[in-house]
Image: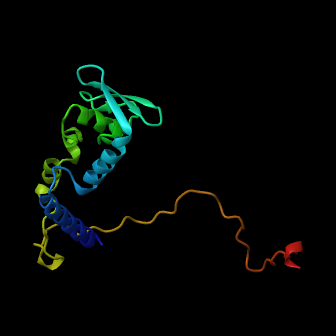
Amino acid sequence: MVERITTYLMVRMARMREAAVKWKTEVGPRIFKMVEKNKLESGSCIAWLSGDMEYQVKHMSGAQYVVDLAKHTCACRRWGLTGIPCAHGIVAIYRKEDDPYKYVHSCYKKAAYLRAYSTPYIHAMPSQEFWPPTNHQPVVPPKYHKQAGRPKKVRAREQDEPQPPSTVNKLHK
């Protein structure tokens, strides 16, 4: 069982490492799709510069949001929770004429992904028959001790003691 889990994790990490090398963007494909979706949603928003890196964004529904590009936050709180710019944030980023992918949290970037999967933490291992013998005694399971707990419901009867009469229920008729 442990060998199966080890093999699964070893193969999965190698597969993830190979997949990350093939990424064409600086973020993963799932994050890329999320940013592209937010770009489409940003078409229904208008941004006005409020301060140095602060914008007021108005949605077509009438809701207004404050976006701070320096802190990577929006009043809708989606950007702060996920680390991916929301539609309101993307409008502000476009108003600044910048790339939305620069504002994606660094944990979603290709460099971080490659750093996480670059070193194989689980190395290949031969089967048990090729392991070197050890001088230690084999591990045995602990001795069984009856645990303290609730006593039995029925007391142990003597051999010559008769069985109690069975009770009839309305359900058993």
Give x and y (percent) for residue 111.
13, 48
Residue at figure coordinates x 55%, y 56% from the top left = 148
Residue at figure coordinates x 22%, y 38% from the top left = 103
Q: Is residue 75 above or below residue 142?
A: above
Give x and y (percent) for residue 125.
14, 70
Which residue reaches farthest top?
Answer: 51
Q: Is residue 142 left or right of residue 167?
A: left
Q: Quadrant of residue 158?
A: bottom right
Give x and y (percent) for residue 121.
15, 58
Give x and y (percent) for residue 160.
77, 80
Q: Quadrant of the N terminus?
A: bottom left
Q: Is residue 135 left or right of residue 71?
A: left
Residue at figure coordinates x 13%, y 61% from the top left = 22
Q: Quick one: 92 or 144, which is closer to the camera? A: 92
Residue at figure coordinates x 71%, y 64% from the top left = 153
Q: Quadrant of the C terminus?
A: bottom right
